[in-house]
Amino acid sequence: MEERAVLHVDFDHFYAQCEEIRQPSLRTLPVCVCIYSDRGGESGAVATANYPARKFGAKSGLPISRAKRLLEGTDARFIPVDFEYYSDVSEKAMAIMEGYADVFEYVGRDEAYLDVTERTGGSLKTAAHLAQQIKNGIRESLRMTCSAGVSRNKLVSKIASGYKKPDGLTVVEAGSEESFLDGLTLRDIPGIGGKTAKRLGAAGMTTVAAVRAADVFDLQRTFGRKTGTYVYNSVRGINEDPVHERPPSVQFSKIVTLKRNTTDPGELAEALQEVCRSLHGTLAERGMRFRLVGIQFVHADLSNRTRSRTLRNHADSLEKLQEVSGQLLDGALRDTVPPVRRLGVKVSDLTKAVGQQAISSYF
Ligand code: DGT
Ligand code: CA
Ligand code: CA
């Protein structure tokens, strides 16, 4: 295989940083972004914690009550998640990164792989400069930090981006993969989970170097051909997975909180038309045509209800958006629904209007 240059970029404490950019005074405080369950009170879990909060042991997955105990006596803030807003930020971040890639693979809201072989001539030194430019671009336009890994392949770049966080940039030169991995634990290698690590340990292999000394046939016998080969290659920093072109899933949505919780069809219809107008403004600005229309109710207990429909053809008019979402609303109200607190409309399966590049052509 030719010598590639692959970047992996992952944002630091992503949800928490999103909150920090809209409320900069949070930056120095411990922050936990929380998913409150609909049982009310403090039940729920931490989605992510910023670095000041992590110093106290707060981290994603902890029950909120446990995080509160850990952060007792500090000026910590507990903020409910706002997924729509994080998607908006993510979309901007992805748009910045995409411009630097020969091939761009969206992995999730806060991370992506970029194949930059062509534009760097395969030089990792040039690729590292590019990674620094991306970090600068993101800092300037979003006021956010991310961490990047640069190497010959996806596996090593992924590990490298997590090596120094936050705001890290780690380059693993061709030929230094093994020595880089030797400083890590087996669990730091994606794909080597607790179960695999335990079995390796039982066979006396507790370090990356120890696994490297193992025979490929022995590994295949223990783990099966596929996993055995993966483990054998991974501890050598070998990985040939291509960066797959995968654009971020594009959708636009608008949601409003109603003046009062209601089931009144007239009130809901009126609010819906207004949401459509606002959403349509965003679409028109960007010259986007839509094919999937969805509506969403959020009830007082934060439970959700959605309905959607795919149109036969792409459309771009406000009338069509209002007509289809109105029909979805009528359909939804045929069932008994609890009072609606927030009402939203989303569109996806988007394409640019004629004359602009079709986003859907990527799929
Ligand atoms: P990092 O990358 O270590 O600086 O921290 P994060 O928070 O960016 O962690 P990452 O990259 O694993 O996840 C990106 C976002 O995804 C994170 O900000 C919140 C969300 N997330 C992470 N873990 C969980 C989880 O266990 N549950 C839920 N609902 N969301 C999570
Ligand atoms: Ca992250
Ligand atoms: Ca991530």
Image: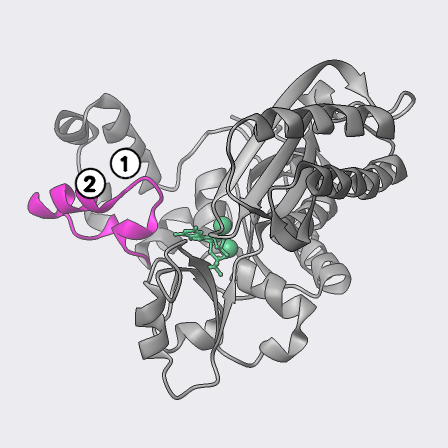
Q: Residue furthest right?
A: 355
Tell me the element at label 2: helix
What residue type is disc 1 on?
Answer: Val
Classify 10 Å Cα crowding around label 1: few (below 14), some (14-19), many (20 and above). Answer: many
Viewer-proximal residue among 253 and 307: 307
Camera sees residue 169: no
Who's the residue at 41% across and 53% down the image?
38
Residue 196 numbered mark, or none: 2
Q: Quarter of the image holding residue 141?
A: bottom right
Q: Is residue 199 magenta?
A: yes
Tell me the element at label 1: helix
Who's the residue at 36% across and 75% down the image?
68
On the picture, is 275 further left or further right than 106?
Answer: right
What residue type is disc 2 on?
Answer: Thr
In the rendered view, would you say 331 is above or below 41? Answer: above
On the picture, is 2 further left or further right than 186?
Answer: right
Percent across and percent down for residue 27 are 59, 76
Residue 276 numbered mark, or none: none
Q: Nearer the viewer, mark 2 or mark 1?
A: 2
On the picture, is 179 further left or further right than 226?
Answer: right
Magenta-highlighted residues: 184-208
Percent across and percent down for residue 180 are 39, 54
Q: Which residue is mark 1?
A: 231
Classify 10 Å Cα crowding around label 2: few (below 14), some (14-19), many (20 and above). Answer: some
Percent across and percent down for residue 212 are 24, 42
